[in-house]
Amino acid sequence: MSLGDVQDASFASASRATVTSYPPERRLSGPVLDAVLRARRYATVATTRPDGRPHATPTSFVLVGDELWLPTVGGAVRARNVRAQPWLVLVVTEGEGDAHLAVVAEGAVTVVPDADLPADVVAAASERLDGRPGWADAWLVLRPARLLSYAAPGWPGV
């Protein structure tokens, strides 16, 4: 399922409050959504600690196919959290006021050792992250099950 399809399904089952907050005319189309996520390097991710408290941190990421790949250190809090509760929320924002953009993706996540990275992920990281991060010994793979986007009227990408 493409990210645009995930977004369509997310809005089809969303609450009235969510649909009102993300009106159809402000949502990114599938191709624009894909282009935005391919062009960005950084996001904020949220995971859940074993005791239920939230944990949020900035991270780099690359979009490969319809998966978001995030480099990490295997012993990092977010890696430990997703091993215990395999769910992650990723938020990309840019701009301010009438020229802002927001993309929220959430879904199941797995941990992949750096040594097991597929060739297309290595290529994407080399291209978009200025090389494969030498410090990363693991990668979190987010397969979005829910995705929402919003582009304000003055966002320059619209």
Image (cartoon, rainbow, N blue to C red):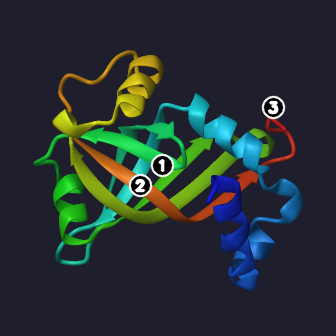
Judged from the image, the secondary structure of the residue bearing numbered disc 1 is: strand
- Give the Cα distance between marks 1 and 3: 25 Å
Q: Nearer the viewer, residue 98 or 142?
A: 142
Query: Residue 130: horizontal and vertical position, in percent?
Result: 39, 15
Query: Residue 27: horizontal and vertical position, in percent?
Result: 79, 56
Q: Is residue 141 left or right of residue 112?
A: right
Dot 2 or dot 1: first in sequence order is 1
Which amino acid does the dot numbered 1 rest on? Glu
Quadrant showing the C terminus: top right
Which amino acid does the dot numbered 2 rest on? Leu
The numbered disc on residue 142 is 2
The numbered disc on residue 67 is 1
Dot 1 or dot 3: first in sequence order is 1
Q: Quadrant of residue 6?
A: bottom right
Q: Which residue is mark 3?
A: 156
The residue under the point 51% across, 60% down is 144
Which amino acid does the dot numbered 3 rest on? Pro
Query: Residue 151: horizontal and vertical position, in percent?
Result: 77, 48
Q: Nearer the viewer, residue 27 or 122?
A: 122
- Of all residues shown, which one is farthest toward the left? 75
- Give the Cα distance between marks 2 and 1: 6 Å
Marks 2 & 1, CB-CB < 8 Å contact: yes
Quadrant showing the N terminus: bottom right
Dot 3 or dot 2: first in sequence order is 2
Crowding around mark 1 (Cα neighbors within 10 Å: few <14, some 14 to 19, many 20+) is some
- Give the Cα distance between marks 3 and 2: 27 Å
Q: Is residue 102 left or right of residue 66?
A: right
